[in-house]
Amino acid sequence: MPMSEIHAALAGTMIDARYQPIVRITDRKPVAVEVLARMNHPARGTLLPYRFVPQMEDAGLAPALTKLVTHRAFADMSAPPLATQGLEIALNFPLDVLVPEAMTLLDAQRRGAGIRPELVTVELTESRPVEDMAALRHAVDCLRGSGYRVVIDDIQPAVPHLQSLMDLPFTGVKLDKDLVQLLATNQDARAFTHGIVAIAKERGLTVTAEGVEDTATWDRLADMGVDQVQGFLVARPMLAAALPLWLRRWSDQQPLHQ
């Protein structure tokens, strides 16, 4: 994609937000929505993040994208009827965006929308390797001190410095969807997941699994001690306007467990 289109997207209305619900396994209660960026391209249609986010990151535009998507999310989630649902908002922040200026901006955006910090989860995505673990720890400490929840995203065996990351003061971990979808057939994936869940439980962390697409995976994760799930079994990412209807329909469904 030409850089002229990338800059035009950030300056105009092409960047949009979608929301994927996260539900608690024990009682199926919706607890959060993850905010996902989309680009509405006039010629190519709606583009998923892998089609434009890496290019923006390579160009140093990750802060601008994060600022824009966060602004859209806070505006959507602070407006009726979603403002009264008590859902947490999970925002994706690349590790290299966690600088003091970005955290100050996040706090200003949140305050402007009238959203309590405990309803905001910052999901740290390791799109680039961690180069300064001490700086990352300081950033996580600052977010926690301001009342935010902080989650390390996309946990799977190939994550660099995973043990060091797990030692940071996060409030939760998120299992990568590719790992989750291997659980039915891959013993190594199951062993790794059991180990991560055990470490998380020792440290009082919430464990969320992405990519849950069938009831067998839901039940397997429940048996492992995973707390929350998201994926197509629950809901596909949707516009904010569709969330109230989804919430009503979800509450009317029978439990997924047999």
Image (cartoon, rainbow, N blue to C red):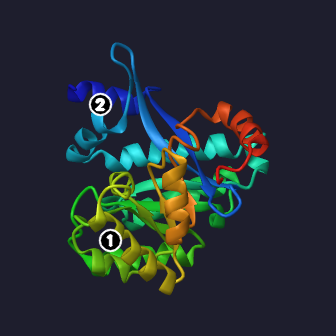
Q: Which mark is residue 6?
A: 2
Q: Which mark is residue 105?
A: none
Res 188 visible = yes
Q: Which amino acid does label 2 sit on?
A: Ile
Q: Which residue is pictured at 47% across the width and 26% down the height?
A: 13
Residue 190, quarter of the rendered image: bottom left
Place residue 229 in its image quadrant. bottom right
Q: Mark 1 points at which residue?
A: 192
Residue furthest bottom in the image: 202
Element assignment for label 2: helix
Q: Is residue 92 above or below residue 45?
A: below
Q: In this view, does 234 lie above or below 12?
A: below
Point out residue 202 in the picture as x, y percentages from the top left corner. 49, 86
- Foreground residue among 58 and 180: 180
Label 2 environment density (alpha carbons within 10 Å; few <14, some 14–19, many ≥20) = some
Query: Which three-letter amino acid code belongs to the residue tagged 1?
Result: Phe
Q: Distance between the residues labelled 1 and 2?
A: 38 Å
The reply, left or right, for residue 177 in relation to residue 85 is: left
Q: Which residue is drawn at 34% across and 26% down?
A: 8
Q: Which residue is drawn at 45% across and 47% down?
A: 67
Q: Where is residue 102 in the image (x, y as percent from the top left)?
A: 42, 59
Q: Position of residue 156 (x, y in %)?
A: 31, 63
For marks 1 and 2, give the one nearer the viewer: 1
**Closest to the observer: 27 or 168?**
27
Going by the picture, which residue comes out furthest to the front?
A: 258
Q: Which callout, 1 or 2, points at the residue further toward the start of the chain?
A: 2
Dot 1: element: helix
